[in-house]
Image (tube, grey):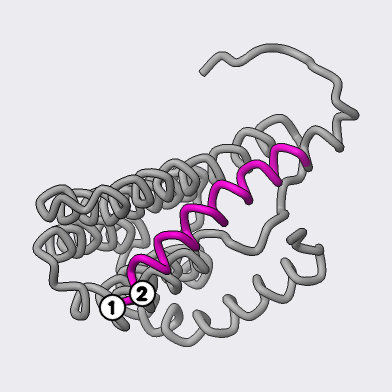
Amino acid sequence: MRKSPQLAKARHSLALRVNRLPAKLLAKTGLNPNVLTVLGLLLAFGVAWILSTGHFFVGGFLVLVSGAFDLLDGALARASGRSTRFGALLDSTFDRFSEAAMFLGLLAYYADQGSHQELVLVGAGLVGSMMTSYVRARAEGLGLTCEVGIFTRPERVIVLAIGLILNQMLVVLWIIAVLANLIAWQRLFHVWRQTGGRQKGGDNG
């Protein structure tokens, strides 16, 4: 399941091509990329509420719309020449909040339904999603590369949306719970291999 540098580069190039035109159009409006980031988070909160009420079909399409916001804010920043380090941090942070909000919406729904298996799977998916992002961020903060694994946030968003629209949530929750956690461990192992298993420093978090 290792993601090669070629695959990562191809994936990044595809995202740039897809986002180029809408980003240029948005740049002409003068919209601040951080405003788009905040709007995306507010939309995610709305989607989370819809999921908590059990309207999965509508929620599935809105998950895709919310995911598009997550992609466009960075593209808008580049197209408008407004890329900043704080904007990048804000984008990454709000992406985590957005994803967590949707999982919490599902948790609220399944808790109300008394669906214990789904509750455990949603919780496991939430943990795996957060840890996948954390391991990469922590590794890159230490000056290491960590672009491995193919089940990253865009894939999780697409799979979740498909499950919601097709009403196949049990299958999709199993996929997310297993793969998200597997990728987190894969990234940890990848960093261990880069460092030769040597320990240096401690966890200050």
Total marks in image: 2
Name the quarter where the N terminus is drawn. Answer: bottom right
Q: Position of residue 49 (x, y in %)?
A: 13, 59
The amino acid type of the residue labelled 2 equals: Gly
Residue 204 is left or right of residue 168, and the answer is: right
* Residue 174 highlighted magenta (yes or no): yes
Q: Which residue is mark 1?
A: 167
Task: Write the residue at 50% across / 72% down.
Answer: 79
Kind of element beneath mark 1: loop
For the record, the magenta segment spans 167-189
* Residue 72 highlighted magenta (yes or no): no
Nearest the camera: 112 or 200?
A: 112
Q: Position of residue 118 (x, y in %)?
A: 30, 54
Q: Which residue is mark 2?
A: 163
Q: Main secondary structure of the magenta part?
A: helix
The amino acid type of the residue labelled 1 equals: Asn
The residue carrying pointer 1 sits among few (fewer than 14), some (14 to 19) or many (20 or more) residues within 10 Å by Cα, namely: some
Quote the CA–CA distance across marks 1 and 2. Answer: 6 Å
Q: Position of residue 179 (x, y in %)?
A: 57, 56
Q: Residue furthest right?
A: 196
Task: Write the residue at 59% across / 39% down.
Answer: 137
Query: Where is 150 relative to 142, above or below?
Result: below
Q: Position of residue 44 (x, y in %)?
A: 25, 60
Query: Where is 184 relative to 162, above or below?
Result: above
Kind of element beneath mark 2: helix
